Amino acid sequence: MSLLGLIFISVLQFEGISGEIKNLYSRAGHYAILSCGRESSSDPTCSHVEWFYNNRDPSHTFTKVSEGKLMLDSVRAVRLSLDTSCSLIIKNITAEDAGRYICWQEDYGHNTHISTSLSVLTISPSPPDADPKRDAEVTLECSLFRHIDLHHCPQISIRWMDETRTVLLGEGEGYKFHGQKNCSSFLTVKRQSGHNRRYTCQVVDEKNNVEIEADYTPVFTGDHQSDTPGPDSTNVPLSSIMTTLRVAGLILMIVITVLVIRGTRSRKPPDDDNVCVDGDEVSYENDEARPAATRLD
């Protein structure tokens, strides 16, 4: 077995006797700070600090920090950092971050450790390709990811609530609760007129104390009746009225200009060489001086 596995087993054995372990909860997309139990000024380089991570059995133990340096051997490394007290900071948390973290310190030949169990709460449509913007209803899945040693989640430890903080059980107006399976709870919500409603998923302990909660608001749009109120025809914005008046004024000016141009052309004087022949005489139609009439022999 690897050295990391041996270290992890020894830590688990120690925790089994002392029970010294911290439970930390976080929501997907947020961040978490896992304490190493050190003062900020003790060793800012964290050169005597190791961080280990395990999400299953001891054989799946990985080094995340060695001698104060982050291990850049996974895509998760870009989301990890250390603060001045050597605490491990995890940004933009995902379900894959759930598990056991151990801060191992060696000061003057004395080894100490702090173990933290990180659980991550997620809410997502089920199945993953469900689209609230397309469908008239959607099933939400609320899941708690945690270390395998914590076993199953007790029944009714993951519950749903509406905007009034009422626990949703069975089937009611606009929803249907499908129950809890292990560490996942399912709720189907339907489109309701008025607005897109917010639903809350809570994780509670055996004393009904809230460990963590997260909100989710399905956005229903598309060809079906929208939850978003439509525009009020009695409350038209002033900017729309002004734009309409400007366009109408421009059209009126164009019409007037066309009529004026046509009227001017219809009153244009005749040309000087416009003459009429009446019998043996030639007459000019303009009012200017005319030449003497010409007699045709």
Image (tube, rainbow, N blue to C red):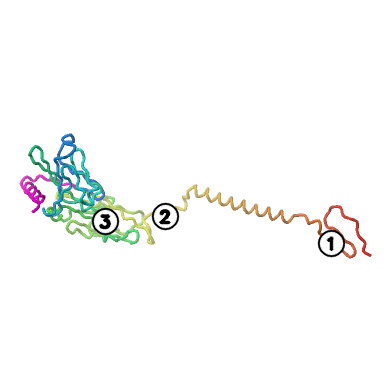
| Residue 7 in picture, x, y percent from top left | 9, 48
Judged from the image, the secondary structure of the residue bearing numbered disc 1 is: strand
Q: Which portion, as a residue range, is magenta?
A: 1-24
The reply to whether residue 210 is visible in this rendering is no
Q: CA distance from mark 3 to mark 2?
A: 27 Å
Three-letter residue code for mark 3: Ser
> 239 or 70, which lies in front?
70
Residue farthest left in this picture? 17
Identified at 39% across, 54% down, the residue is: 229
Of tags 3 and 1, the one toward the viewer is: 1
| In magenta segment, residue 249 | no
Q: Horizontal placement of 223 versus 63: left or right?
A: right
Q: Residue at x 81, y 59 (%)?
A: 274
N-terminal of the two: label 3 or label 1?
A: 3
Residues at marks 3 and 1, CA–CA distance in whole angstroms: 94 Å
Which numbered dot is residue 230?
2
The local crowd at label 3, few if under 14, some if 14 to 19, many if 20 or more residues have their Cα within 10 Å, is some
Q: Nearer the viewer, residue 142 or 21?
A: 21
- Residue type at numbered disc 2: Gly
Q: Are marks 1 and 2 in contact (CB under 8 Å)?
A: no
Instruction: Check disc 2 and report its element: helix, strand or loop.
Output: loop
The residue indicated by pointer 3 is 124
Query: In this figure, which residue is indicated by the disc labeled 1?
Result: 276
Residue lying farthest right? 297
